[in-house]
Amino acid sequence: MPSQVAGFAGLALKSLSPTQIAFIANLPKAELHAHLNGSIPIATLQEIARDFPVGDDQSDQVKVGLEKLQHPDGVGLEEIHDFFRLFPAIYALTATPEALRRATRGVLREFLEIDDSIGGPQCTYIELRTIPKSTGLMSRGEYTRVVLDEIEKYPAEQAALIISVDRKMNETEMGEVVDLAVSLKEEGRRVVGVDVCGNPLNGDMNHLEPHIVKAKAAGLGVTLHIAETKDNPPAETLKLLSYEPHRLGHATFLDDEAKEIVLGSSDMCIEICLSSNLLCKTVPSLEDHHIGYYLDRNHPVAICTDDILPFRNSLLGEYALLMAAPPFGLGLKEAQVTRIAEMSLRSRFGH
Ligand code: 6MZ
C-alpha cells in the first residue's frame, strides 16, 4: 500500500479527475532524484523503529526528529536548514545491515510495485541514490552492497544505484566514495552514476575535480546538486558546471551566465523537485518555479520526488502538480506532460 500523499502534491492529486489520474499513472516515467534515507515510506520507518528501537541514550535531536517525521502531514519546515537536521534521526534507525535492507526494500516497493488504487507503479524505472556510510556496524562498502543487493532483485530496466558524495566530506573521503563507485561498477554491480549532495552550504567543491574526472572515465554518469540556495556563490556554481555534469539537481539559483552554459549543453537534464523546493521555501510558489524557464526553452527536465519521507509526496503527486489547474498545479496539457515523462526516460544513466 503506498503512503498517503499530503501537502502541495496531495492537493494537486485531489483536484484531478479520475481520468487525469489514470493518464499520469499510465505514463512510463523515470524517478531520477530520490535519496534513499529520505525516501523511506512512513510505514516502513515505523516498522523499523518498532523492531530496532533506538536506545535511551540517543540525543534529543534524534528523539525530536523521529516525532516530527511521523507527523501525518509531513514535517513543517521554516527553511531548508531545518530539513538537514532531520537526518540524524533517520540514520539512528538505519545503522544496522538488517534495518538498512528493510528500508531499501520499502523504498523500492513504494516506487516500483503496483499500487492497486492507481492501477500501476509510481514509476517504470528508478535511480535511487545514497551516501555510503560507515556506521560502526557496516563499512561504506558493506553499506553499499546491502543497498545494491536489494536493487539488483529488480531487473536492470527497473532499478539502479547512484552513489552520493556528501558535500561535507573532505577530499580523502570524496576519493574513497568515488573509488568505491568505480570498483563496484567494475565488479559488474549496478552502479550507474555519482552525485554530490548534502547541506548546500557545506564543503569545498574545488576538491571534487579529480574525482569527477575519474568517475566519468569509468563510464559513470555525473549529477550534481547545484545552486540549491540563494547563498551558494556564483563562483561555486560555475566551478561545478566546469566539471560538465550530465545532470543537475535543483539548479534553483542559476544566474544568467550559468543558465547560458546549461542551455548550451542541450542534454544537461535538470532534476526538478517541485514539492521539495516549495516545502524548503527555496521557491515561493509553483508559478515562480524555474521549471517554467526550462520548459519554455524545450530544455530537458525530469520530475522527481527528492525525499518522500519528510515531504509526504509521491511521483504521481509531482506529476499531478504539472497537470492540475492553477492554483493547485501548472495546468499543463497531456501532450506536455507526456513529453516531460519521456525526457525523464531519455536522461537515465542506466537502461
Ligand atoms: C541536498 C539532500 C537533499 O544519502 O543518506 N539530501 N541533499 N538537497 C536535498 N534536498 C532538499 N535531500 C536529501 O539520503 C539522505 C541524504 O541525502 C541528502 C542529505 O545529505 C541527506 O543526509 P542518504 O540515503
Image (spheres, rainbow, N blue to C red):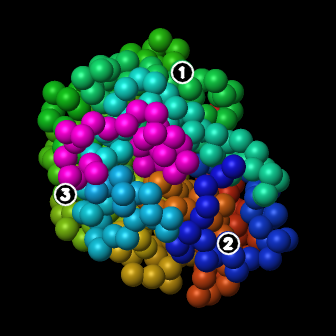
Q: What's drawn in magenta, residue-wise?
A: 35-63
Q: Give the mark nearest the N terminus, 1 or 2.
A: 2
**What is the three-letter code of the residue carrying label 2?**
Leu
Q: Which mark is residue 190?
A: none
Precedes in sequence: disc 3 or disc 1: 1
Instruction: Please check the rendered image and state whether residue 51 is part of the magenta-colored stretch, yes or no.
Output: yes
Residue at the extreme top of the image, as rendered: 187
What mark, if any, has residue 149 been given in the picture?
1
**Given this view, does label 3 or label 1 mark the residue nearer the observer?**
1
CA separation, marks 3 and 1? 33 Å
> Among all residues in the image, which is located at the extreme right?
19
Q: Residue at x 25, y 63 (%)?
A: 81
Q: Is residue 197 magenta?
A: no
Quadrant containing the C terminus is: top right
User: Horizontal and vertical percent for residue 309?
Assistant: 47, 54
Vertical side of 256 occupied by 35: above or below: above
User: Circle 1: is it few (<14), some (14-19), or many (20+) Cα within 10 Å?
Assistant: some
Name above or below for residue 248 compared with residue 73. above
Residue labelled with disc 2:
13
Residue 201: mark in rendering: 3
Lateral position of residue 327 relative to residue 29, left or right: left
Residue placed at 44% from the left, 57% from the top?
Answer: 70
Residue at point 45%, 82% (across, down): 285
Classify mark 1 as within 8 Å of ligand 1 or not, answering yes or no. no
Where is residue 198 drawn, in percent x and y?
Answer: 28, 49
C-beta proximity under 8 Å, tags 3 and 2: no
Query: For this view, does 120 lie left or right of residue 314?
Result: right
The residue lying at 50 percent from left, 24 percent from top is 148
